[in-house]
């Protein structure tokens, strides 16, 4: 489906939870955030029904995000449901990989095709500092399990401050090259001030070719991460929400006072 700027909108990112088992400094304040009531989180049935409608409008690519999607109870069942929608050509998931050792094979068997994994440094102490207590050993074990399960390609999302030539980013790149992984460098973003740029190694952040809609964990369809436009799919229904999001997708992102990464994903 084409928006009014002739962009082919075929990619849907779905946040399944606002919870996370890490507290990364660039994503959450130290004191945490106010969490959504469990009753307001979309059920798997609601998500599946929405996607079934969305593919009728041309959505062919779905990525599951969070928060951390692997802490959502029975997440494998959602993947199994979505994988049965024949119009979907690509079903992927973004994770911090803390739980991926356990879930990689079940996810693959359920129909997941590939994963994106967050990894900003290989330094044990820096990783613990950035994530406020995370264990990098679990991430590396998760990456290994993902490779062994058959998930492919495996992309590594490395957040940088200024350049991929920063020491930690260079080491992450070397690790990826040595292990058959694809690395992408993502500049730190600020939703409130509208700070974002094109992903190095990807197309994210390039507004002129943006092909995404985002469904937040509390049921709002958003046509742009850096904008407060949102449509409640429960109130409007899937078809009307999709039509409105498509019609009102902005030419370029500006800023958002309402969006939060843990609710809408990256």
Image (tube, rainbow, N blue to C red):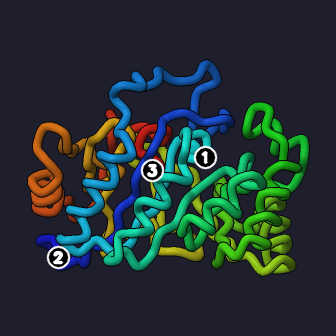
In this image, 159 relative to 236: left or right? right
- Viewer-side residue, 23 vs 76: 76
Query: In terms of image quadrants, where is residue 8?
Result: bottom left
Q: Nearer the viewer, residue 73 or 249?
A: 73
Q: Is residue 188 above or below residue 114?
A: above
Of discs 3 and 1, which sits in the foreground?
Answer: 1
Question: Considering only order in the chain, which callout, 2 or 1, is on the residue closer to the N terminus?
Answer: 2
Can residue 192 be seen here? The reply is: no
Q: Which mark is residue 70?
A: 1
Percent position (x, y) of residue 137? Answer: 88, 50
If you read the primary sequence from the N terminus, does the residue marked by circle 3 or circle 1 appear first?
1
Local SS, label 2: loop
For image coordinates 28% across by 71% down, the residue present is 59
Q: In the rendered view of the protein, which quadrant contains the N terminus?
A: bottom left
What is the CA distance from the residue labelled 2 to the residue labelled 3?
26 Å
Determine whether the residue tagged by mark 1 lies in a helix, strand or loop: helix
In this figure, which residue is indicated by the disc labeled 3? 195
Using a 10 Å C-alpha cutoff, classify the residue at mark 1 as few (fewer than 14 neighbours), some (14 to 19) or many (20 or more).
Answer: many
Residue 158 horizontal side relative to residue 27, left or right: right
Tell me the distance, in whole angstroms, between the alpha carbons under discs 1 and 2: 32 Å
- Element assignment for label 3: loop
Q: Is residue 262 above or below residue 137?
A: above
Q: Residue at x 62, y 68 (%)?
A: 108
Identify residue for label 2. 2
Q: Residue at x 44, y 68 (%)?
A: 83
* Residue 142, image x, y percentages: 78, 57
Foreground label between 2 and 3: 2
Given contact means CB atoms under 8 Å apart, are the residues at marks 1 and 2 in contact?
no
């Amino acid at each position: 489906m084409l928006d009014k700027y002739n962009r082919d909108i075929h990619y849907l990112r779905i946040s399944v939870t606002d919870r996370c088992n890490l507290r990364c400094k660039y994503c959450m304040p130290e004191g945490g955030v106010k969490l959504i009531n469990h009753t307001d989180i979309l059920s798997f049935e609601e998500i599946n029904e929405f996607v079934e409608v969305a593919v009728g409008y041309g959505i062919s690519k779905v990525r599951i995000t969070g928060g951390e999607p692997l802490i959502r109870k029975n997440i494998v069942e959602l993947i199994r449901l979505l994988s049965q929608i024949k119009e979907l050509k690509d079903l992927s998931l973004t994770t911090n990989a803390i739980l991926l050792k356990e879930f990689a094979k079940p996810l693959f068997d359920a129909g997941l095709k590939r994963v994106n994994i967050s990894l900003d440094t290989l330094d044990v102490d820096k990783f613990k500092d950035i994530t406020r207590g995370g264990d990098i050993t679990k991430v590396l074990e998760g990456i290994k399990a993902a490779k062994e399960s058959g998930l492919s390609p495996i992309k590594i999302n490395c957040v940088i401050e200024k350049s991929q030539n920063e020491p930690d980013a260079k080491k992450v790149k070397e690790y990826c090259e040595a292990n058959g992984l694809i690395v992408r460098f993502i500049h730190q973003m600020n939703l409130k001030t509208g700070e974002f740029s094109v992903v190095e190694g990807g197309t994210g952040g390039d507004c002129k070719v943006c092909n995404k809609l985002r469904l937040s964990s509390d049921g709002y369809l958003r046509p742009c991460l850096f904008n407060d436009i949102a449509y409640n799919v429960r109130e409007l229904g899937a078809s009307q929400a999709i039509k409105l999001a498509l019609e009102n997708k902005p030419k370029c992102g500006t800023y958002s006072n309402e969006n939060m990464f843990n609710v809408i994903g990256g």
